[in-house]
Amino acid sequence: MNTSYLLKESNTNDDGDDDSQGNLSRSWGNNPENHNLHNKTGLRILLLVISSLFFLFIIAFLIRSQLSDWEHLSEPWKPLAQPWQLWINTASLVVASIFFQSARFLSRRIDVGNATQYQKDFRIAFQCLILGGIFTITFLAGQLYVWREFVQLGYYINANPANSFFYLFTGMHGLHLLGGMIAWSMTVSRVWNGASLEHLKVKIDLCAIYWHYMLGLWLVLMFFLTSSPETYATLARLCGL
Amino acid sequence: MSYAEETEDIALHEPKGFYSKYVWSQDHKVIAIQYSLTAIVAGLVALVLSGLMRMQIGFPGSLEFMDANTYYQAMTMHGMIMVIYLLTALFLGGFGNYLIPLMVGARDMVFPFVNMLSFWFYLLSVIILFASFFVPGGPTGAGWTLYPPQAITAGTPGAEWGIVLMLVSLAVFIVAATMGGLNYVTTILQARTYGMSLFRMPLSVWGIFMATILALLAFPALFVSAVMMLFDRLLGTSFFMPEMISMGQQLDHKGGSPILFQHLFWFFGHPEVYIVALPAFGLVSDILSVHSRKKIFGYKMMVWAIIAIGVLSFIVWAHHMYVSGMNPYFGFFFATTTLIIAVPTAIKVYNWVLTLWKGDIHLTVPLLFAVAFIFTFLAGGLTGLFLGNVVVDVPLSDTYFVVAHFHMVMGVAPILVVFGAIYHWYPKITGRMLNDTIGKLHFWITFLGTYAIYFPMHYLGILGMPRRYYDSSEYEFIPQSAHDLNAFITIAAIIVGVAQILFLYNLFHSYFKGKKSGNNPWKAASLEWMTTETPPIHGNWGEKLPVVHRWPYDYSVPGVKEDFVDQTVSETQLQAMIESQKVKS
């Protein structure tokens, strides 16, 4: 919560006396212009909830990693010692994020007054949006490929808690991206059906924020999945575990 | 009354037929009623389960079907339904949905479709939970805390299907609560009407706002523990399951940490106490102020206390785990934080009492419930100070003292507020008053009855009577007097349970036959009473939004004909009102 705003808004003393008439202009009100702001705020609060969720998963991971039966997946000859496939997947997600950012940039600078430029920018923005989705699907397919590799190598979900957490982290992250893909597909279909530019701009903005977050989250998860046993031990000690 | 200068151009999802108006409604008021009725039905099931349990405790063997398994299943379902599916859903989904837009001057929640989804996910979670009564093995009997390894080990009732349905239901509930929570927080932050600054919001909104933030941050902990336990149960992982032998068989699990589950569960579980308590604090503040015709004492202090309690509630969770074993320094830390949380809580209690002090107290039914809440919360809170200390908690932890404590502080106290709030806002919701005589009868039976139930439990606890025992009649260390007391408690519980029929009757009867309430029967100053129509129409405010000029607690204002000044009256209008009153007199 933005506390500076809270203080600025406080025109009422402890007895509730109205000591200012100026607050009307500072009120958020219920204006339609604020609807975009509502969407962004809603998304940011959702990201806060997702952060809380994964923070707790990571804490559970750190605690569990300090118990004796944990077999680190990042040790030599283990599948995450050289996680090249994960890096390729990560690159896909980075590219997806770049495309979403490009679409966001283009949709922001679109000039409705210049019809030719408008058509061009609108088309490129839409293409970037589509490509962002395609690279996300590539990422998810790549993650499924890694799962298949794990299974073929005998690293089943119940064989060791380290494996369990690998499937849990990648699965939960993938599910969140799939949720994003639902929003993405709704946006694409609305554009396809001739939704307004204003509508497209807001939705692309929201998609871009969500995808950047998902990329950041994946990098954090990958750090934990591929770190050395010493790193886990140090982090666990820092957390007092 | 002041209105905005311009009308807005907002799509309001106007209902077009019966289904879009009453079933697939996106109107916050209808969703609130849907939430509330579902929660009340769930709560009635939990009430019946508690009656069955009390029969077994007070009169062992009196119910033929009540064996140990059934007892533990009833206990588990009673606890979980009351805490999550009744209280959380009713305070946030019910009161939150109904009151937030009306109190902050919005036309609806900012995401009405998501709000509707929130209710349907909630209903789905209730259906999944109740389905466990009908699956092989019945519902889980692991206790409402669902501790592993017991919860998913053969021999525990419902270890096959019941626990799976419980965990899935909780996960679905959390999705519902998150969708609702996004709405409440965003609406409060960004859809307040003109002039409605944060420090002009009623304390009800503040309480629900902070409780929602707690829910958004704490429910993920329950989600994490539910998902990981589902993995342990269904996929054979060992997140929580240690190496163990069950029924003479070595299980496939090994190395998991049951304590890890406890940490995750209570990281949710303790804020959950305040997810229930903070809305109750807010609602009771408003009820006290209106019915004692006095401004709330120390408004800003009350707001900061709500925020402080919310923040502190995240660093006290391990006081539920003193007997699970922990580093003594951790015990010291958590005991200290637990006792510190008593400071903002005490501030609130003092301020409620000082609000009543020298007020023009109207002994209405809502006020009776509000005052009863103060007594009950104080009693439950003080025993919390006992249990917050490690050395006192260890001997009392598994006794009826704890049962008495948590029922007083987060069972009876919030339920008293629920009743008070329903009596208070029912006229706004339906346009009719609840019957006063039935209300008072309901109040006295419920208030005195719950004390007859829970006060003696403190003595049973100090006597050393263990909780969770299915049948305590065969233990020599439990004297006959304890059994007699248990029989007395059971009779009181049955009376209180049956008396709730009065409340239900009042709700239904008054809906059709109650006295017409008008717009503002309590002469309250807050915005929800300023709607153009009662019950408020779709969109709440007619053509233009109201403009707010003051806080919602201007009662007993000198020189004004009515003894209150509502939030929409400007300083100029107030001066004019005072002048005209002077002329008349």
Image (tube, rainbow, N blue to C red):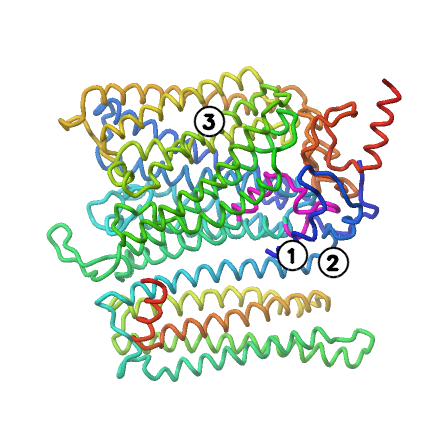
Residue B584 higher or lower than A156, as above or below: above
The secondary structure that most of the magenta stretch takes on is helix
Q: Residue at x 30, y 32 (%)?
A: B401
Dot 3 amino acid type: Phe
Which image quadrant for residue B284?
Answer: top right
Please tell me the numbered disc located at residue A4: 1
Dot 1 amino acid type: Ser
Q: Residue at x 83, y 27 (%)?
A: B578
Q: Residue at x 70, y 48 (%)?
A: B12
Which of label 1 and label 2 is nearer to you? 1
Question: Counting other residues with Cα less than 10 Å from the Cα at mark 2, is it few (<14), some (14-19), or many (20 or more)?
Answer: few
Which image quadrant for residue B387?
Answer: top left
Q: Position of residue B420 (x, y in %)?
A: 54, 28
Which image quadrant for residue A182?
Answer: bottom right
Task: Report whether B554 appears left or right of A72.
Answer: right
Q: Which span of residues is magenta-colored?
A: B189-212
Q: Residue furthest left?
A: B248
B191 is within the stretch colored magenta: yes
Q: Residue furthest right?
A: B583
Q: Are marks 1 and 2 on the same chain?
A: yes
Question: Counting other residues with Cα less than 10 Å from the Cα at mark 1, is it few (<14), some (14-19), or many (20 or more)?
Answer: few
Q: Give the labeled residue for mark 2.
A: A33
Task: Report whether B557 appears left or right of B405.
Answer: right
Out of B64 and B427, give the one closest to the viewer. B427
In the structure shown, which secondary structural element does the residue marked by tag 3 occupy?
helix
| Mark 1 or 2, nearer chain start | 1
Q: Give the labeled residue for mark 3.
A: B375
Q: Position of residue A172 (x, y in %)?
A: 42, 65
Q: Position of residue B283 (x, y in %)?
A: 56, 35
